[in-house]
Image (spheres, grey):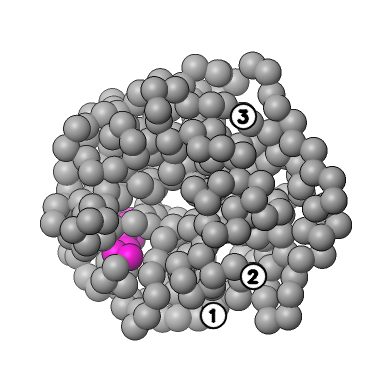
Amino acid sequence: MNYKQLVIGKFILLSSLACTAGTDTTDWMPEQSFTQGVEGPAVDQSGHLYAVNFEKQGTIGKVTARNNAMVHITLTDGSIGNGIRFDKAGTMYIADYVNHNILALEKNSEDVKVYAHNDQMNQPNDIAIMDNGILFASDPNWAENSGNLWRINTDGSTSLLEKEMGTTNGVEVSPDNKTLYVNESVQRNVWRYDLDAKGNISNKTLFHHFEDHGMDGMRTDKAGNLYIARYGAGVIAVLSPKGKLIKTINLTGQHPTNIAFGGKDGKQVFVTMQKRGAIETFNNDIAGRNY
């Protein structure tokens, strides 16, 4: 593959210093380096950060350092990625909301394959993964303020776990793999399910409800706290395993779409920002679940 290296000139100094009063973040990638479809941040085993729609729609960008990124791969057939996750073998899974797919790119490969497909999906949006490789996908229908929840089994088959929910968006697994969290953006609910080793869910309970603004992607840390991108609020909300709001991290932009843990110790957090087309970052006191 011919990688296209991004060289950012005059923005380097600005972005490296970009932490305005009242914010807790700095810029890792500057404004408009990604499209407003920037989403799906995920970090691989080598510590490289990936996010969708770098420079143009339909790409996967690879960020190797602050202000340095390249087109890692360009999706074909009109596919556009959203959520990204890695399994323990280093395979990248990509939610392709245009063609109702979960795509897969094996480690050190350039061949993107359709891992799972189901025409009944509205648009697979965000994905979560268990340690055993079982995936979960949120599936919103924005026009009707509704959504579904799917399980993608390790053979690539799909199972509809729940239909006619609210506008399903962020989805995440707890560090012990015994809890699944799903949020509904429009209804501002976060739901909690018991999760077994086969990816079956039970005992649905309301985990937290926000009174304003929306929600997007979510991640857990090693202590089981849940980090939620609060779209429109310009913050990352952190909930305890009991559903209590512990703290909020103030962002420069108002429209975070998703978050990921990375860095040398797993304590650096990356936040994709829709309107800015940027990636913000902050240092956390607890490492992410996958570190």
Name the residue nearer the viewer: 50 or 3.
Answer: 3
Per the image, the residue denoted by label 2 is 252
The boundaries of the magenta stretch are 178-185
Is 228 on the left-hand or right-hand side of 69? left
Residue at position x 72%, y 64% in the image:
26
Q: How many residues crowd around disc 3 within 10 Å: few (fewer than 14), some, or many (20 or more)?
A: many
Q: Position of residue 146 (x, y in %)?
A: 19, 58
Q: Nearer the viewer, mark 3 or mark 1?
A: 3
Q: How many residues crowd around disc 2 within 10 Å: few (fewer than 14), some, or many (20 or more)?
A: many
The image quadrant that residue 22 belongs to is bottom right
Q: Secondary structure at mark 2?
A: loop
Per the image, the residue denoted by label 3 is 72
Q: How many residues crowd around disc 1 within 10 Å: few (fewer than 14), some, or many (20 or more)?
A: few
**Image marks 3 and 2: residues in contact by CB distance under 8 Å:** no
Between discs 3 and 2, the one toward the N terminus: 3
Q: Which mark is residue 147?
A: none
Which secondary structure is most common in the magenta stretch? strand
Q: Nearer the viewer, mark 2 or mark 1?
A: 2
Magenta highlight on residue 183: yes
Residue at position x 70%, y 51% in the image:
29
Residue reaching furthest to the left:
164
Q: Secondary structure at mark 3?
A: strand
The amino acid type found where label 1 is placed reads Lys
Q: Position of residue 242 (x, y in %)?
A: 37, 76
The image quadrant that residue 188 belongs to is bottom left
Between discs 3 and 1, the one toward the N terminus: 3
Magenta highlight on residue 138: no
The amino acid type found where label 2 is placed reads Thr
Q: Which mark is residue 247?
A: 1
